[in-house]
Amino acid sequence: MIHELKTVFSKKMLIISLIAVMFLPVIYSASFLTSMWDPYGKTEDLPIAVVNEDQAAELGEESIRISEEIVDELKASNDFEWHFVESDDAHAGVVKGDYYASITLPEDFSSNASSLLTDEPKEMALNVETNPGYSYSGKSIADQSVLAVETAVASEVRELYTEKVFETVNDMNAGYKEASSGASQLTDGSDRLAASAEQLGKGMETLAGQAPPPLAAELAKLIEGNKQINQGINELGDGSENLSEELTAASEEVSSYAFETENAQLISEPIKVNKETVTEVENYGQSFAPYIIALSLFVGAIAFSTIYPFRTRDRESATLLIWWGSKLSVILAQGTFQAALLAVFILKVLDIPVENLGSFLLILFVISNTWVLILSFLVAAFDKVGNFLGILLLVLQLGASEGTFPIQLTNGFFQAVHPYSPMTYAIKALRESIFGFEGNVPFEQALWILVAILSGMILLLGAVYYYRFQKELKTASELAKRGAAI
C-alpha cells in the first residue's frame, strides 16, 4: 500500500487528476442544480405571445372592447414576458420555440362579454396554442400564463357587470322618485275630487231645502263644483299617466337583462379555454427522450474513452495514415454500434413514436460518433486528464443544453453557454425528428453543426497522432544515434 502511495505521489499529473476527480460530484451538483434551481420563480423571463383580435361591441348604450383593459393589465404585469403580436407570428413562434404559448382573444370576445345578461349568454373563449414537443416542462409552466389571463378577464367582467348593475339600480331609483312624484300628484287630485264632491253634496242639500227663487244661485254653485270635479279628475289622470310612464321605463330597464342561473354562472366563470398543441406528447418520458438519448450517448462515449487505448501504436501501424485510419475505424465502429443498439431499444423496447424515422436514425448516428470522437481526441491529447475534461464538458452541457427546463429559466451563465454547447443542437435535432416540427434551429442546421464538430474532431485527432508520430520518430532517431556512438 505504501509503495502504491509513493508511486501515486511521484506522478504529478496523476495527483492533479485524482484531486480534480474529487471535485466532480460538487461540480456536477452545482451545475445541474443551479441550472434548474427555481424555474417557477423566473417565469417573468418566459416568453408568451398574446394576440388581440377582439372587436368592439355594444352593452346597452355603451361601446365596450374588454380586450383593451386585459392587454393593459398584462403589460403592467411581470408574471411572464408578454409579447403582443399578430396571429401568424404567434403560431410561428410557438412552433419554433420562440414562445412557449400563444393566447388569442378572438373577434367575438367583447361581443360574448356583452351577452352575459341576455336570454342567450355566450362564453368568452381564449384560444391557446402550445408545443410540448419543444419543451414539455416549458409548456407546463406556460399553462400558468393562461390562468393569469383568465384571472384578468374574470376580474374585468365582474367589474364591468357590477358597474352596469349599479347603473341600472341608480336609474331605477330615479324612476321610482319620478313615480313617487306622480303618485303625489295623483293624491292631490283625489283630494280635490273629494272636496268638490263634498261641495256638490252641500249644494244639492241646499237646493233641496230651499224654495225655487234661490234655485238659480245654488245651481251656479253646483256648476262651479262640477268644474272643480272635472279639473280634479284631469289632474288625477295626468298623475296616473306620469306614474305609468315612469314605472314602465323602470320595468323596461330591468327587463333588458336576464337574471337566470346560467347568467350568474357565466358571470362567475366567463372564460372557456380552447387548447391546441402543435405536437402530441403521450407522456412525460417521451417528452424527455431527446435529452436522455443525447446524455446516454455521451456517457457511453466517456465509458469507451476509459477503456480503449487511444495513445498506443501497434507494429502494423508503420505510417501516420495507417495509425490514424486504424484508430478511426475502431472509434467510428464503436459510435455506430452504440447508436444502433440505442435505436433498437428506443423504437422496439420503449416503443416511442417517432415522426421522422429517417431523420431520427441519421441524427442518432451523427450524435453518437460526434461524442465518441470528442472523447477520443481529449484522451489521445491529454490522457487521463482528457477523461476529466470530457466529464466536465458533460456537466456543463447538462445545465446549458435546455434538456429539462426552458433556457430562459436558468441563470445567466448557462444562457451564455447555451449556443456553444454541442448537446444543445443534438437535443433540438432529436426533438424535431421525434415530434415532427421545425424549431428555431432547423434540423438541417443542427445536423450540419454536429457534422462540422465531428469532422473537426477527426482532424484534431489526426493532428494529435501526427505530433505523437513525429515525437516517436525523433526519439527513435536519438536512440539510434546514441547506440551508434556507443
Image (cartoon, rainbow, N blue to C red):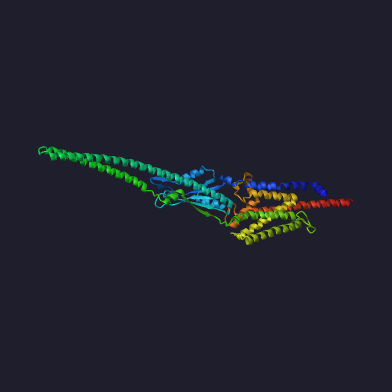
Q: Is residue 105 left or right of residue 225?
A: right
Q: Name the spot of residue 449 as percent of width and height, x first.
A: 64, 53
Q: Is residue 449 left or right of residue 324?
A: left
Q: Nearer the viewer, residue 149 or 313?
A: 149
Q: In this view, does 45 lie to the left or right of 193?
A: right
Q: Can the viewer see residue 135 in this picture?
A: no
Q: Name the spot of residue 322 as percent of width and height, x first.
A: 76, 58
Identify the residue at horizontal 56%, vertical 44% (top origin).
44
* Residue at the bottom extreme, as displayed: 348
* Residue at the front extreme, as displayed: 209
Q: Name the spot of residue 112 as percent of width and height, x first.
A: 43, 50
Identify the residue at horizontal 80%, vertical 53% (top origin).
473
Q: Name the spot of residue 189 as percent of width and height, x first.
A: 25, 40
Q: Nearer the viewer, residue 218 or 395?
A: 218
* Residue at the right extreme, as displayed: 486
Q: How many marks?
A: 0
Q: Nearer the viewer, residue 402 or 186?
A: 186
Q: Can the viewer see residue 2 in this picture?
A: yes
Dividing the picture into quarters, in which one does residue 316 lie? Answer: bottom right
Q: Is residue 387 left or right of residue 91?
A: right
